[in-house]
Image (cartoon, grey):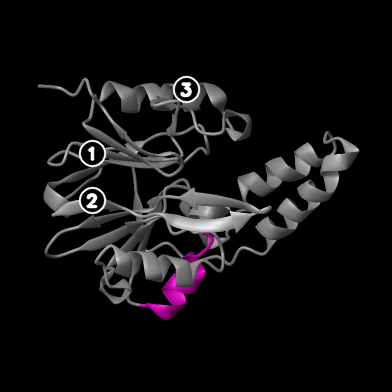
Amino acid sequence: MEIIQLDLKFNYNDMEMVIHPSVIKDEKEIILVDCGYPNMLPILEKELENKGVSPESVTKVLITHHDDDHMGALYEFKKKYPGIKVLASDIEKDYISGKKKSLRLIQAEEMLNHLPEEEKDFGLAFIENLKKIKHVPVDIAVKDGDHFEWAGGCKILSTPGHTPGHISIYNEKLDTVITGDAAVVENEKLSVANPQFALNLTDATKSLEKLVNLNARNYFCYHGGTYINEKQKE
């Protein structure tokens, strides 16, 4: 049993970027946590194979929240591998399925009127990209405290703030947290991820504290990579 951090590399505005979905793996289940932007399926498949995971073997995809860099490739993945089950929080599921309008899209539309003129083209392009996201029904809704036997035991943690229904995953046996966007590694420490985009910064700060207080050995962050806690519990 293990948790594997993926490295999805791509170019954005002539810069190389990287995001880090994770894989929870044991003898019975292979759970992919988040899956990248739209059109990233080939990159995702190649990276899974590079890390010794056959894409066909994935049993579940768990989406931490409905931002496009986390669920954008879900439609493509589900279409190619229809046997997978999609999991998300009971709060996020209606945004992922398209029953409710994306909160990030609402935020972007509201911010557009306040952007400097030189940034409005970027804002408009961002809005159009969000509108193009293809939605997927959620098979299993989860909530804070739910426990699964994946890789020795995983607990769902409610970590709102970035979005209202954001979740993280704590694996007790491996003492590892998959943070999603509830934390980011910056300057060799855990911080609030993209605070300027947090839909509720107060909640985001509390969620970061919640994760830090776990005092886990490893934190796998979607942005920034892995944080290894040198002060891990004895």
Say which amino acid is labelled 1.
Thr
The residues tagged by marks 1 and 3 sit, at their Cα atoms, a distance apart of 20 Å
User: CB atoms at circles 2 and 3 under 8 Å apart?
Assistant: no
Bin the neighbour count of mark 1 within 10 Å (Cα to Cα): few under 14, some 14-19, many 20 and up.
many
Say which amino acid is labelled 3.
Thr
Bin the neighbour count of mark 3 within 10 Å (Cα to Cα): few under 14, some 14-19, many 20 and up.
many
Residue wearing tag 2: 3
Residue wearing tag 3: 205
Label located before the other in sequence (1 or 2):
2
Label located before the other in sequence (1 or 3):
1
Total marks shown come to: 3
**What's the magenta region?**
72-82
Q: Position of residue 12 (x, y in %)?
A: 63, 54
Q: Position of residue 36 (x, y in %)?
A: 49, 58
- Rendered view: 207 above or below 21: above
Direction from residue 34 to residue 11 in the image, left or right: right
